[in-house]
Image (cartoon, grey):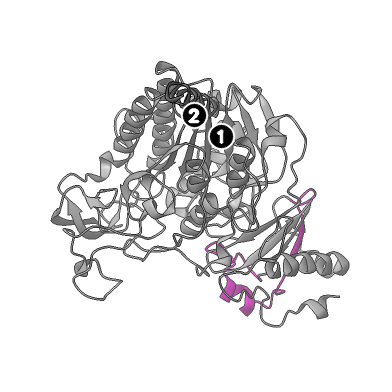
Amino acid sequence: MKSYLLSLGICLSFLLEAKHSARPNVIFVLADDLGIGDLSPTNANCKIKTPHLQKMADEGITFFDAHSSSAVCTPTRYGVLTGRYNWRSRLVRGVLSGTSKHLIPAGRETVAHLLKKVGYHTQMIGKWHLGWDWGKADKSERQWKDIDFTKPVINGPDINGFSNYYGHCGSLDMPPYVWVDTGKVTALPDREEGVTKSEDPYGWYRNGPIGSDFHIDEVLPHLFEKSIAYVTERAKTKKPFFLYLPLPAPHTPIVPVSPYKEASKMNAYADFVMQIDGHMGELLTTLKKVGVDENTLVFFSSDNGCSPEGNFTRLKEFGHDPSAGFRGHKADIYEGGHRVPMLVRWPQGIKAGQTSSSLACLTDFYDTMRDITGQKKKDQGGEDSFSLVPAFKGKSKTTRSTLISHSISGAFAIRQGDWKLCLSAGSGGWSDPREGEARKLGLPRVQLFNLKHDRNEKKNLHAKYKDKLSELLGMLDKEVKNGRSTPGKPVANDREVSFLPAGVSISKSK
């Protein structure tokens, strides 16, 4: 009897392992401040050479109407991992710093939790920028001088579903500059370092403590080296893995290295984009080398549009537009702020050479993985996430019909079909007119655009189409109050959410 039970146990274990191994490995690569116009798959007029990402697109699916959930980094990262819009959390506007406390509570399920439950090893390598709790010498939260780097870092990615993590706390221009490996600083700071914008308009970063093993120019290649080593190691186990690889580039400091430095013949930003493309080629080659290429699902996208730090004026001299003709850039509520490239490759599960005009959001990663791994929907978790699997299978649409966007200042927009309503008088971000200037000019407090006829968002139709304005406001109000944009039981937001500009009300719009 014991022999029978032992044999049965071994058999069940084998079947369980076989089931897990059949699931795809998953790699989600998130570039930082990369515009939709900066890659050839999403911009026919792109002047930056991105052959490896073009090949990835040719071998998978390219989304042309994909969006980050915010026009800046921290909130988008929240959305990628939770499948939930950031403004439902305590993050009302802006981004976190390198010393901010953790944003995602342990009880909030992430895609890493989702995958870990069905046997995945989960790893984060790169720029976290969602806060973690440094060991402190006192109660201060804001100053890196109060950090005790000998103490463990707590409430990092490990409480958000990651088995292990290796990365830095915020953007690469935010101190402190140290590597943290699953709660432990790898090398104590041995100096303070920084570069001013006047010293280097592309490669500047704020002054702060820096670890002895942390070298700004080497950060991007170092993270890809770590990622390639991780993939190589996990391939030996024959069990599924999830690698979340949020890059620090091409965000400032813009520091391309040889052989990419000056390779574009345009500027350092274009060089840095070429470097990302080169490293992606190395990563994709590794998948083939270690024998996991066919059943590895790779996402590549960006957290928001290109930053002005990329120097739009200089790039324009070469006929290149990081926003691909869309209005605005990083931080804005306009399309250039949140319409991003999204490429997905999975030889075993996605037919090569597909393109999609389906409305998509980076929050959709959560439900896509829930769908692929066959898990049931829950009331909480992925409240603003819609599966991309129908698009993977060639369908013209997914079940997503609306999109709520958010700017750096906390301005809202809602999209349905060709219509987009911006609840701001100006850009809601950094491009002209900024909000204060727009109000001084007496511009309307809301902007209604039809993107089919006006992709540049220049013709405000709010006065002409009042019924459409009212309809979109009603949709936004409902999705805010329900705590979700997906079907299901209403749930609570983490705070009271207000989205109407001063002087605007839903009743007045009817």
Res. 464 visible in picture: no
Q: How many marks?
A: 2
Looking at the rendered structure, the secondary structure element under dot 2 is: loop
Instruction: Identify the residue position indicated by label 2 in the image.
Output: 50
Please identify the quarter of the rendering in which residue 353 is found: top right
Q: Which amino acid lies under the numbered mark 2 shown in the image of this protein?
A: Thr
Q: Main secondary structure of the magenta part?
A: loop
User: How far apart, in angstroms, are the residues tagged by discs 2 and 1?
Assistant: 9 Å
- Looking at the rendered image, the disc whose residue lies closer to the viewer, 2 or 1, is 2
Q: Nearer the viewer, residue 455 or 206?
A: 206
| Residue beneath the point at 57% across and 54% down | 337
Say the numbered circle drawn on residue 46.
1
Q: Which residues are magenta?
A: 425-454
Q: Find out whether the residues at labels 2 and 1 contact each other: C-beta distance under 8 Å.
A: yes
Q: Is residue 438 magenta?
A: yes
Residue 183 in percent (x, y) is at: 27, 52
Q: Nearer the viewer, residue 378 or 256?
A: 378
The extreme left residue here reads 190
Q: Which amino acid lies under the numbered mark 1 shown in the image of this protein?
A: Cys
Q: Is residue 369 magenta?
A: no
Residue 95 in percent (x, y) is at: 45, 63
Q: Nearer the viewer, residue 270 or 225?
A: 225
| Residue beneath the point at 44% across and 41% down | 244
> Are there few (<14), some (14-19), or many (20+) residues within 10 Å of tag 1?
some
> Are there few (<14), some (14-19), or many (20+) residues within 10 Å of tag 2?
many
Residue 288 in percent (x, y) is at: 45, 18
Q: In this picture, is 411 found above or below 78?
A: below
Q: In this picture, is 126 found above or below 295?
A: below
Looking at the rendered structure, the secondary structure element under dot 1 is: loop
